[in-house]
Image (cartoon, coloured by chain):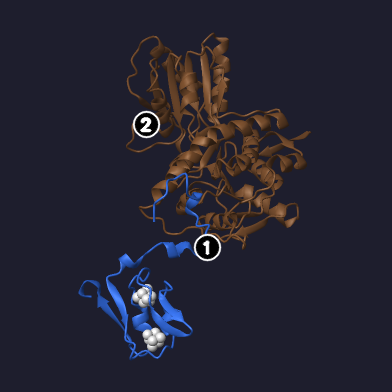
Amino acid sequence: MKEKGWKEIPIGGLIIEAGNAEKYKTGSWRTFRPVRDEEKCNHCLICWIYCPDSSIIVEEGKIKGIDYAHCKGCGICSTQCPRKAIKMVEERSK
Amino acid sequence: MSRIVGLTGDETAAEAMRQINPDVLAAYPITPQTETVQRFSEFVANGLVSTEMVRVESEHSAMSACVGAAAAGARAMTATSANGLALMWEIVYIAASYRLPIVMAVVNRALSGPINIHCDHSDSMGARDSGWIQLYSENCQEVYDNLIQAVRIGEDKDVLLPVMVTFDGFIISHAMERVEILEDEEVKSFIGEFRNSHSLLDIDHPVTYGPLDLYDYYFEHKRQQIEAMEKAPSVIKKVGREFGKLSGRPYDLLEKYKTEEAELIIVAAGSTAGTVKVAVDELREENVKAGLLKIRAFRPFPYQEIAQVLKEAKAVAVLDRSASFGAQGGPLFLEVRSSLFEKDRRPPVINYIYGLGGRDIKIEQIKRVYEDLEEIAMGRRPTQPVSYLGVRE
Ligand code: SF4
Ligand code: SF4
């Protein structure tokens, strides 16, 4: 994203475009990446409810994957998963 | 048409607030501001205003409530003094950063400690870098006039900054004076309606206030605040002229009192300016070319206009009612003196710290300052740049 000058942005640090957090990629903040085991997962969607960054991708009621461009690696999904289907893996050992 | 009444400074502030009829007023009582809010609460109880009055548990909450209200699109006001302002501190900066044109009466009182309830300017001077516009008042009439103008100045589209209107605790807040009050309708049409173009309640245009703002954009937002302050002087002047047409009392950034052809000029803010005027009048009778430059707007600081007035003087004294510990002098002195730095011709400028904790300042003391200036004008080098007027050695 090209960074804008002070004359081009809303005053007061306001965000006036709803939902534009999507444009701000936070994936690089991650140290640990959540990796889901399709075998263990029963698509209960608990991780989807808990993810603070809306990074669990769901289509037609099924987990399709994780949005690594925005996932910050907080590990909440992994902690909450009742089936221990999400492992946190250190980024450099991918 | 205006009516003439006898009011104390606190009562005058409440009267201005009644006419402004803000959507929200959130405040916590503190001496010497108390009577302002107390009287305003009577207006609320008697149905004379349609204001939502929020009785908060602290000044931090008072300013927080004002921020929330203004972000929601309300015209919000508050009033405080000294330690109350200190407790608000965090949110005072936030109000300015969010560009919310809240108007706050600051009844100047010495900051603790040791605890003291009387006047000095340490409270508002401490907030000089918070991003608020600051207008200092000489008397009850100016309290009234400044509060009404503050609404227009802060809400101007080129400015959008909060405004502090200050007046000296007890000296103004508790002294009764003659005040001219405009008609309610005149004030109403002068201030107009407040329209926040980014209201939190505008569900068709959702907006986020206060998101995280890191090294990638924070600097740009600060640059915008600087720009708003740079645009403020012309708005203060414009509103001052329009107010003059309405009331017969025009306002500027500064008041020049007999400064034309004055050789010895005192620079002062607040009620002391009134005392200096009496000294100037008496000295003029004795053919001493004395003058006063009264600071009305301290933020934005009108350095060009100040330099213009002072550059031809032979000697200048700046009176500061607050100390800046460890600095080269009081806050007003430092800025007045540096405003002259670019001028080829610049008079010697000396500083007097006075009136801390409500210590009285008398006409004779001010005349002594003019005597000092007279000697400096005749060539005596100032023995020290900063003196303490009225302290016991
Ligand atoms: S919480 Fe676990 S089991 Fe449930 S959908 Fe997420 S990964 Fe699958
Ligand atoms: S690690 Fe955190 S951010 Fe990433 S998918 Fe899990 S809950 Fe969401």
Say which amino acid is labelled 1: Ala
Category of crowding for the residue at label 1, using alpha-carbon neighbours closer than 10 angstroms: few (below 14), some (14–19), many (at least 20): few
Front-lying residue, B356 or B21:
B21
* Figure check: A38 above or below B289: below
The colour assigned to chain A within the rendered structure: blue
What is the display colour for chain B?
brown
- Can residue A89 be seen in this snapshot? yes
Q: Measured from the top left, where is residue B271 in percent x and y?
A: 56, 32
Closest to the observer: B134 or B323?
B134
> Is B281 left or right of B87, judged from the image as shown?
right
Decide: is B154 above or below B353. Answer: below
Name above or below for residue B102 compared with residue B272. Answer: below
State the image coordinates of residue B165 (x, y, percent, origin top left).
Answer: 57, 40
Q: Position of residue B373 (x, y in %)?
A: 43, 16
Badge 2 element: loop
Chain identity of mark 1: A
Q: Name the mark on residue B329.
A: 2
Split into quadrants, the picture shows ligand 1 in the one at bottom left
Q: Quadrant of the C terminus of chain B?
A: top left
Towards the viewer: B278 or B141: B141
Position of residue A88 relative to residue B238, above or below, is: below
Q: Secondary structure at mark 1?
A: loop
The residue labelled by disc 1 is A18
